[in-house]
Image: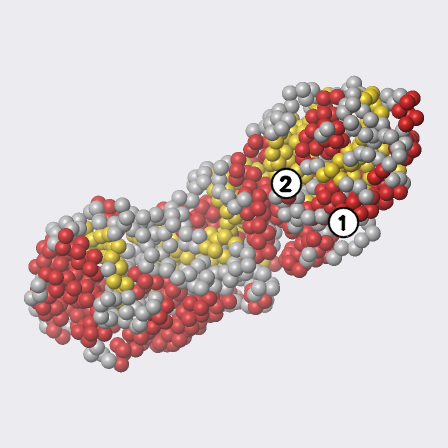
Amino acid sequence: SSFIALRKPNGKFFPWFGLDIGGTLVKLVYFEPKDITAEEEEEEVENLKSIRKYLTSNVAYGSTGIRDVHLELKDLTLCGRKGNLHFIRFPTHDMPAFIQMGSEKHFSSLHTTLCATGGGAYKFEQDFRTMGDLQLCKLDELDCLIKGVLYIDSVGFNGRSECYYFENPTDAERCQKLPFNLENPYPLLLVNIGSGVSILAVYSKENYKRVTGTSLGGGTFFGLCCLLTGCSTFEEALEMASHGDSTKVDKLVRDIYGGDYERFGLPGWAVASSFGNMMSKEKRESVSKEDLARATLVTITNNIGSIARMCALNENINRVVFVGNFLRINTISMRLLAYALDYWSKGQLKALFLEHEGYFGAVGALLELLGSA
Amino acid sequence: MPMRPSKEWVAIKMAERGGRGSGGHGSLDKSITLPPDEIFRNLENAKRFAIDIGGSLTKLAYYSTVQHKVARVRSFDHSGKDIEHEPLYEISVQEEITARLHFIKFENTYIETCLDFIKDHLVNTETKVIKATGGGAYKFKDLIEKKLGLKVDKEDVMTCLIKGCNFVLKNIPHEVFAYQKDSDTEFRFQTNHPNIFPYLLVNIGSGVSIVKVETEDKFEWIGGSSIGGGTFWGLGALLTKTKKFDELLQLASKGQHTNVDMLVKDVYGGAYQTLGLSGNLIASSFGKSTTADKEFSKEDMAKSLLHMISNDIGQLACLYAKLHNLDKIYFGGFFIRGHPVTMRTITYSINFFSKGEVQALFLRHEGYLGAIGAFLKGAEQDNPNQYSWGENYAGSSGLMSTSPDVFPMQRTRSGTFDMFEMDRLERPLVNLPLLKDPSTYIPDTVDLTDDAMARKYWLTCFEEALDGVAKRAAASQPDSIDASERAEKFRQKYWNKLQTLRQQPFAYGTLTVRSLLDTREHCLNEFNFPDPYSKVKQKENGIALKCFQSVIESLDSLGWEERQFALVKGLLAGNVFDWGAKAVSDVLESEPQFGFEEAKSKLQERPWLEDSYSQWLERLKEGPPHKCALIFADNSGIDIILGVFPFVRELLSRGTEVILACNSGPALNDVTYSESLIVTERIAAMDPVIQSALREEKLLLVQTGSSSPCLDLSRLDKGLAVLVRERETDLVIIEGMGRAIHTNYYAALKCESLKLAVIKNSWLADRLGGKIFSVIFKYEVPCK
């Protein structure tokens, strides 16, 4: 073809994308070079320029695409180039429109490889080829996830720490978010909470295994909330949850035993049966949608905490890193996880969180693109 | 056995004097479909009450003493009497008192009327407290105290549950089963393992409790989950507007979870091959309902919820099992309670998450564990744990499948009563020390739950024989005015049991010929026919004793090798005389002269169907005499006297000690221990070899602890086991169809064994590839 794309010493053409197509959300990271020379600017083909401008000058794309501006990593050096890393997401059901757009913008004329991970890399591979004339480079989601986590943690979050934890998680008054140094991360248990949950034990950069997974994840929270409250977005569901009271819905230990169940060392506040009060007709009629949303959130979160804790014990690992988009704008769940891990392990386990929550797979895919020269 | 003079006796007398009371049946709810005196049995002398009140069901437990008629044999004093024309011994029917545990399960709605009924019929005034457990114990405390005038003494739920669990695991054969999908027999029963500890108990009530049980008294709550039966019920009610738990399960059994759940293939388009995750695996439960615009069917949502909860529980249970290094998980609680749907999903989940390393197990009497435990807490004075107990098949309802789709007929049962009774066995039962591997020993040869053809045959066979058995039972008590009425009741009861078993072969554990025979014995006892064959046995023993000396003389005239063969033929011919087998009872009733010699001539010529006689002969010829032989005898009369005793005599002459084991209680025409004592005494009077062996304690008579025509080598009298060890027994001889073919045909022992029998059932003979009267002679030497 007639254009000359930007070329770097390692031979990677722009644009640099990393794509993670999950069950519910598509995560896209885009590296915007900021060190473009005048000569490069001149040589840059029109559609490449327009992609760059489109992505960097907007914070929303169509009705569903969103750029998480607050997560942008500035002045990053990647493969010898300086630039900013942008984090964009849109629902997986808009994948066909995305491919359509790529086709209209003649993405295939750019001499780049589109590295994609997540289940959708397989599911939509055919569509990319037929509709967009694009050959995807499919990457394993767990490989990408770990690469992404390690990389982002190493570069930090614009001078701040990427990793954090909650101090005094069991004390509502004194609980506070504090940075955590993940310099020597191994071994760690990585719990990725997307629509479903995958749990990995990571022993080194290369050595990890998937320990288990559960189908009770973010999709379950959102799916049940839609059915129970009629809400239609994750944000709406979380907003409702933040105003609800789960103890009206759940049966607590104290509801059964009048207080703590000392025989088993169970505190009265512990949930004995999630949704247990809903066995009663009167109580079903007296709860609000907010209460139901909160109970759903607490149920799913506690369960993930429980499974993660058991995996940590079985694998003999005491640091548990929670990632995934379920945790986005979801302080309730993060604090609950921190609390549950600390309380039930008697302080032996530590829950850690990362600022870029759900984007590590996409970052890993981008790194694969740049690494596989 | 001496009658125990006890307080219970006084209670019975009082009850008799006071009559049965005015009935009081009218006060009971009309919807109770069984006569209440058939539910709350033996209330007259009941004591030690315990109650477990759950969310919807109440379980009542009590201890009673049951007055039985038992046939006793007693030797006459023959001095100066005409022995020729007197019967050999005297048979008298006596009253005996045995202990029984009663457990009754009914819906909470009946609690008040049931308490009234109990109050009206309770005579024992010793009872001051009632042990109570379960979530509902609080709620009904005042009612119970008011109605019964007993003090309610609360016991911890989990402690009771585990006490009950240990008790059934130890005492009830085939208590435990695994669930298998897509199989003719959904339930696969497990052999009782000699050591039940340690195990994991996962109780799925409204929440989930995971308990590790290490010893009888030591258990630890190691974890739990709030996602349990209450979540299924509560969330299910919200999602489907269906209020009842059972209805939710029914909805779930009809739904398609793939309409609601996001599967791996929905994300990947196929399988996630790198990880080997199948495309049909659920990636996100309810992951497809993340929309406000779409309607989902109740069935699909219920199914998705069921999968979500079952998978989650299974996963956590596996994680706990792994952490504590356990491979057996027993599941209980109302979420499981006999529901095939939940057993199936839990089993699937355990298999999936443990990759087959952990087994999900269920209990037949799961619903009773709390009541059993609470009862045991209150009955510590009676030391129930020191005894062996046996399930009474006549008084127990058996396991009912609650699956409405599988057994629509059984649905009528809900709303009525379920019963479970256990009899205290007067002697503790243990494993035969010579079993090669007690943990894998299975007494029964054919599993009729598994083998539909065999099941059909045997159920029909027992049905066809039933009229004859009832007739014989009535005839055995000519002096009793109500004998025929009781015989009819027996017939009806056993007939109903057979019909239940046709529908639900797994009701009492693995269905076997043994369990069918035992159930019949239990039913006969229930209607006071303790020993219908007592007179027949008496007569046959008398006839056989008269022939004993001539049989010995003719054997002694033979050369060694011919004698060995004649002895074996004698044993086999004696075994033809068996009232238990229909073909033979026909012959015996029509041809009373059918004798020992004729029996021999009926035997199959060698080579026999199973024939290791040559190896046996070789062993006798070449090897040193056995140190001690344990013989399990079969029938009275010709079998024991002309078949077994000459054989015993030969062994004794070789220098082998003999332990002769006979049943403790009567079953068919099998020789009982007390009969064997008299018979032996008589033979000793005629035969110096037997006489000196008895005197020198080289011939020992023991009881098996059993009253079954079959033989379970894992439940034998402790005294027998002790003796077997003391005498260093190195040969076990098992004779008869019941003991050597229906059971123990494949039993592996640590020492040499002989299993011999004549097949007196043409169907069975056909199955084994032979004809009627085919001979089994199985001599086995354990491999080194």
Q: Same subunit under labels 1 and 2? A: yes
Residue type beneath disc 1: Ser
Q: Earlier in the sequence, mark 1 or mark 2?
A: 2
Q: In the rendered structure, are the residues bearing label 1 and label 2 in contact, judged by CB atoms less than 8 Å apart? A: no
Instruction: Name the residue: 38% across, 67% down.
Output: B520
- Compare residues A135 and A117 and report the one nearer the observer: A135
Which of A310 and B471 lies nearest the eye of the viewer? A310
> Residue B349 versus residue B7: which sits nearer the camera?
B349
Whether residue B243 appears in this view of the structure is no
Residue at x 36%, y 56% (from the top left corner): B443
Nearer the viewer's eye, disc 1 or disc 2?
2
Q: Give amino acid for label 2.
A: Thr
**Which colour style is shown?**
secondary structure
* Vertical placement of residue B372 versus A212, above or below: below
Residue that mark 1 sits on: B289
**Image location of residue B365, percent across then percent down:** 49, 54
Q: How many marks?
A: 2
Which label sits on residue A365? none
Q: Residues within 10 Å of mark 1 (few under 14, many from 20)?
A: many
- Residue A352 point in image, percent of width and height: 69, 27
Estimate the x, y position of residue B497 in percent, counting from the top left: 45, 67
Left or right of B282 on screen, residue B371? left
Q: Quadrant of residue B297?
A: bottom right
The chain ID associated with circle 1 is: B
State the image coordinates of residue B588 (x, y, percent, origin top left).
26, 77
Q: Residue at x 43, y 39 (%)?
A: B215
In the picture of the structure, the residue carrying the numbered disc 2 is B274
In this view, which residue lies farthest toward the bottom? B590
Q: Secondary structure at mark 2?
A: helix
Residue at 78% across / 36% down in the picture? A114
The correct choice, above or below, for A130 with respect to A170 in the image is: below
